[in-house]
Image: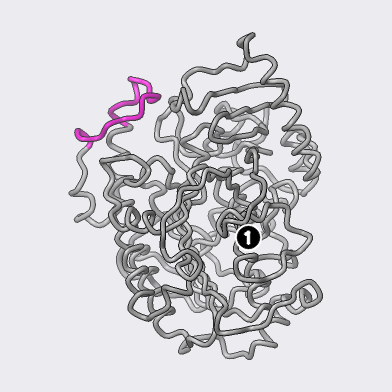
Amino acid sequence: MSNWPEMNRRQFLARTGAAALLPMISCTRTAKKPNILFVFADQWRAQDTGYGGNPLVRTPHLDDLAAKSFNFTQAVSGCPVCSPYRASLLTGQFPVSHGIFYNDKPLNADITSMGKLFAQAGYDTAYIGKWHLNGHLPGETYRESRDRPVPAGRRQGFEFWRVRECTHAYLNSFYYDEHDEKKVWQGYDAIAQTQAAAEYIQQHPQDNPFLMVLSWGPPHAPYHTAPHRYQELFSPSDIDLRKNVPLEWHDKARDNIAGYYSHIAALDECMGNLISTLDETGLAENTIVVFTSDHGDMLYSHGQIKKQQPWEESVRVPFLLRYPALHNSQGKTLDVPLNTPDILPTLLSLAGIDIPDSVQGDDLSGHIRGTATETKEFALLSCPVPFHQWNYHRGGREYRGLRNKSFTYVRDLNGPWLLFDNQNDPYQLNNLVDHSQYSQLVEELDAKLDARLAAIGDEFLAGPVYMDRWNYQWDGNDAPA
């Protein structure tokens, strides 16, 4: 393909460290290996899709995809914030294991990760969009670090490269290619990035399987920067708010949500273009398509903004997986809890690649294949270190918790903090943790939480302990008083 790095595969594997993974993987390239198109947005909560029950958003393409996909209705972002999600996605590990529990910290360049595993297994690997795993240099602010290129040795096995570390200025934003050449996405960057992904698919040799990861910046704030034709679709006066948005925040919430929905409408159209590209190239049948998000957005529910918090608006994400060669595009709803570290082992299994011992997440491919003999009971929620919009001075706190379709249970450093009945109280307005009739349930869930933390080696310590352990510096006013 044109514009690919000028190196052969063996050189690429050696440079990225993927060659070191040879002993742990048994997989050879065949024409039948599925392509993987993994698309995720930034800060798109599960509640805001048409197929998820919101009649105001405009998501016809996703609604159609959902009808032909496995819809994981209980998918969560276990540590609901940008860099921790991305590190867990790539490694299949939890934050206190891979060490990215705070934004703008560097993921270990030698860690076993998605791009390396698929590259060694014969896949061509590509990444487009937001990265947010490079970290910053000593004496450098995180804002400065977001504008420089990611060195080749820190790209975690991805070969085709159209990436910026992080930006939320979505109009004519710049990026770097695999040669560190600085270029510009013309117009609204998500549309331009989608076009680049479509061109990659169109030009890619069909006898080689590919792994393409497309990481959009929207619908993350700023909320009012989508192209005008999408903003015209939504008026604040038409927005119905969730029942847990306090009255004093109604006007602000309606205004921001109208802009949020305009980003969503644009991204939905982008997703439709990608699906059309797969159809037109004849690749749809043997391509695993995933659509999801790194975390949600509170948007003033419970009077809160952004992410990190353990409430539904922050932790629940959309997660659709379509693989026509396996299920003939027959849609199916799955209620099994899916957490971020589960994504890598599930994709590896579907692609016939051995799962390395370093992975802590659960392989849920049996639920997709219909061969699972037991189900996963809960997804683990965590916030090892609260920071930025939810730092200690703004009410942030460390927590660990369990969530499934029925309950959300959360403990902070002082003990049980939250218990919600997710089916009878979907807006989580009634905290049951101190109700005597639920004391036995709290004890049971607390014991299950202890067992889960022990299984992954999470000691649940205070945030500053982890910051010291990983030799991290606090940003701004994030450090506790």
Q: Is mark 1 on a helix, strand or loop?
A: helix
Q: Tell me if 220 is positioned left or right of 232 in this view.
A: right
Q: Name the residue under label 1.
A: 344
Task: State the residue in front, 184 or 407.
Answer: 407
For the record, the magenta segment spans 236-252
Residue 63 screen position, x and y as percent: 33, 53
Give above or below for 325 relative to 359.
below
**Placement of the C terminus among the 4 image quadrants:** top right
Q: Where is residue 13 in the image (x, y as percent from the top left)?
A: 69, 81
Question: Which residue occupies 73% across, 75% down?
Answer: 17
Give residue 446's quadrant in the image. top right
At x 38%, y 25%, the residue is 245
Look at the picture and state if 277 lies above or below 474: below
Which of 74/415 is in front? 74
Q: Is residue 163 visible?
A: no
Q: Write the residue at 68% across / 71% down.
A: 353
Point 75% across, 64% down: residue = 356
Q: Residue furthest top?
A: 436
Q: How crowded is mark 1: few (under 14 residues within 10 Å), some or many (20 or more)?
A: many
Question: How many numbered circles are shown?
Answer: 1
Q: Position of residue 361 (x, y in %)?
A: 68, 52
Q: Is residue 477 left or right of residue 414?
A: left
Any part of residue 159 in sight = yes
> Residue 265: percent from the left, percent from the top?
29, 53
The question of residue 242 being in magenta is answered with: yes
Quarter where residue 266 is shown: bottom left
Label 1 sits on what residue type?
A: Leu
Tell me: residue 341, above or below residue 192: above
Quarter holding residue 154: bottom right
